[in-house]
Image (cartoon, helix red, strand yellow):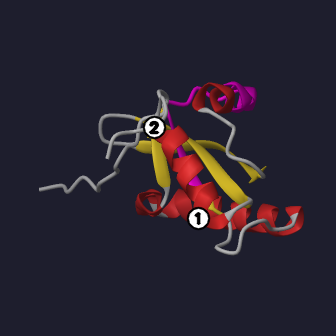
Amino acid sequence: MTPKYETDFDDWLVETFAKVGSFTMLIVLVDVGETTVTPLASSYLHIVGDETRWPEMVEMLSGAGAKWNAAAFYQADRVGLIEDSTAKQRLASLTHHLNGDRSLLAHSDFFNAGGLRLKIEEVRKH
């Protein structure tokens, strides 16, 4: 299928919004090294339309002050929007678990700094 928009992120956001409507998104900014992935900052965002494109998202994420090169996005709940207090609790739980288990990033919609989809795989040591 040919992408309709500039980036994979744009396609993902439009498709996700078409499926679920408004939703709350948990965001984790990370630094991806050659064999490491380090969470740097996190936040949540209520998505109430599908107009946001990657350049606007990057501008917003730059406010975190972290030197990130990838971002992981999770739907906070399958039903759509959730209250701020619930989003904060779920974000705290997610970041706590990510600090101990980076494989949880495989369950996110993961994009590089250019908005292109990434796939994360565990590096096996021999």
Instruction: Please tell me whether residue 79 is drawn above or below residue 39 in the rendered image.
Output: below
Q: Which amino acid does label 1 sit on?
A: Lys
In the figure, is residue 105 to the left or right of 58? left
Quadrant position of residue 64: top right
Counting from the top left corner in percent of width and height, residue 8 is at 45, 39
Residue 118 drawn above or below residue 90: above
Q: In this view, does 15 lie to the left or right of 79?
A: left
Magenta residues span 59-73
Residue at 87% across, 61% down = 84
- Residue 50: name its quadrant: top right
Work out whether mark 2 precedes mark 1 in sequence or the reverse, and give the earlier one: 2
* For residue 97, side relative to residue 4 (left or right): right
Identify the residue at horizontal 60%, vertical 47% (top origin): 28
Q: How crowded is mark 1: few (under 14 residues within 10 Å), some or many (20 or more)?
A: few
* Residue at the spot of label 2: 4
Percent x, y for residue 105? Answer: 46, 57
Q: How crowded is mark 2: few (under 14 residues within 10 Å), some or many (20 or more)?
A: few
Instruction: Give the SS element for disc 2.
Output: loop
Q: In which quarter of the image is the C terminus?
A: bottom left
Image position of 89 (left or right of 21) = right
Q: Which residue lies furthest to the left in this view?
A: 126
- Res. 19 mark: 1
Q: What element carries label 1?
A: helix
Residue located at (29% from left, 56% from top) = 122
Residue 71 in magenta stretch? yes
x, y percentage for residue 39?
A: 55, 45
